[in-house]
Amino acid sequence: MKPAFPDLIGNDRLRARLAEDIRSDRFGHAYILEGADGSGKHSFALRIAAALACEHRTEDGFPLPCGNCPACRKILSGNSPDVITIGRGDKVTMGVDVIREMHADVFVAPNELSDKVYIIEDAQTMTVQAQNAFLLILEEPPAYVRFLLLCDGSAPLLETVRSRAQTLRTEPIPPALLADYLARTEPAANILRNGNPEEFAEWIAASEGSVGRAKMLLDPKKRRPITDARDAARTFAELAAAHRESTRVLAFLASFGQKRDEAIARLSVMLVCIRDLILLKQTEDAPLCFFYNREEACALAYRFTAPDLLRYASGISDAMEALRRNANLRLTLMHFAMQTGLLS
Ligand SMILES: [Zn+2]
């Protein structure tokens, strides 16, 4: 049998498991699909909806979804009235009004298909009130309804919501697979790979295992802030390994600029960098997310003790948390540097 979801790459086990649930009619009413922003959760969700409706769903020899039957085509082009995407619009959170509107629609039978699929984007932003309203539907949904809750992490969801859904996690696509896929499908990627292998490797690493992010970063203007953040993370790791060169540390802190969101984004790249080094302390074969040159990463990891790296990781997490709670940017960075021993 052909692999399920043939136009996606990576996440082989997850794809096989979902296909099995669908083919054997064991697909549940609600799934939480966790994965980083831009990791293709929406594409995945659309393909799940198509697989549920595909006219060749139970036939051998067809990939799931086939992509060619009328049901598949309508769903994959975003034109099925029975596959409904719900989001928070331009608001920070998803309020109870959004869920109430959905509630009214849920009890209207599907137009054309046997299932009605609701794709809920950024489900982690539902307010508690919204989640409680959602629970009322989730407790006794009509037999034809399926919910796909997409989120970057399910922790903000109430336990009562999580316990009524199956949680699945999409994993980042391994760099080599992502590189081959992009070189095959994006002419610009192939040119970059042949013309400037170093920049190609940097771009693949900055994509963090996401096809969507990689495509966005094909534009050098969009890639620039990300590569700047990666350079900053490397500078940080060097400074931390070199033990307290206060002039350089202060210059590094000043390079953060004034914008809170950008500072949080930089810190999160630093965290990915430090996590790689922590993993390398366990085993030199560890899967890496930040570094693409394993030798360089191993040499850097060698210069740290494991407790040092853990202290930096927790310091970065604390700083990100403080900034999200609106703490003063300069003071937070200074506190971070003192607390971790970067400055003494
Ligand atoms: Zn089909």
Image (cartoon, helix red, strand yellow):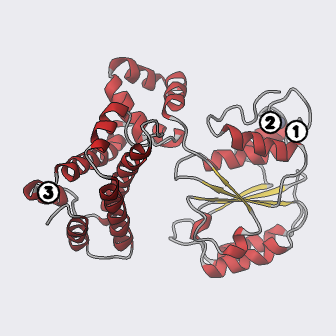
Q: Are marks 2 and 1 in contact (CB under 8 Å)?
A: yes
- Vertical comparison of 239 with 312: above or below: above
Q: Mark 1: is the Cβ under 8 angstroms from ligand 1?
A: yes
Read off the residue under disc 2: 64
Report crowding for label 1: few under 14, some 14 to 19, many 20 or more residues within 10 A (C-alpha). many
Read off the residue under disc 1: 57
Residue lying at 37% horizontally and 55% vertically, measured from the top left: 271
Judged from the image, the secondary structure of the residue bearing numbered disc 2 is loop
Which one is earlier in the sequence, the residue at label 2 or at label 1?
1
- Vertical comparison of 221 with 89: above or below: above
| Residue 197 % position (x, y) | 35, 23
Q: From the viewer's perspective, is 109 left or right of 63? A: right
Judged from the image, the secondary structure of the residue bearing numbered disc 1 is loop
Q: Are marks 1 and 3 in contact (CB under 8 Å)?
A: no
Q: CA distance from mark 1 to mark 3?
A: 61 Å
Task: Give the image quarter of residue 247.
Answer: bottom left
Three-letter amino acid code at the position of disc 2: Leu
Read off the residue under disc 3: 244
Which one is earlier in the sequence, the residue at label 2 or at label 3?
2
Does residue 53 show up? no
Three-letter amino acid code at the position of disc 3: Arg
Q: Nearer the viewer, residue 265 or 49?
A: 265
> Which mark lies nearer to you, 1 or 3?
3
Q: Which mark is residue 242?
A: none
Does residue 279 show up? yes
Report crowding for label 3: few under 14, some 14 to 19, many 20 or more residues within 10 A (C-alpha). some
Three-letter amino acid code at the position of disc 1: Arg
Q: Quadrant of the C terminus?
A: bottom left
Q: From the viewer's perspective, is 95 left or right of 187? A: right
Q: Nearer the viewer, residue 245 or 217?
A: 245
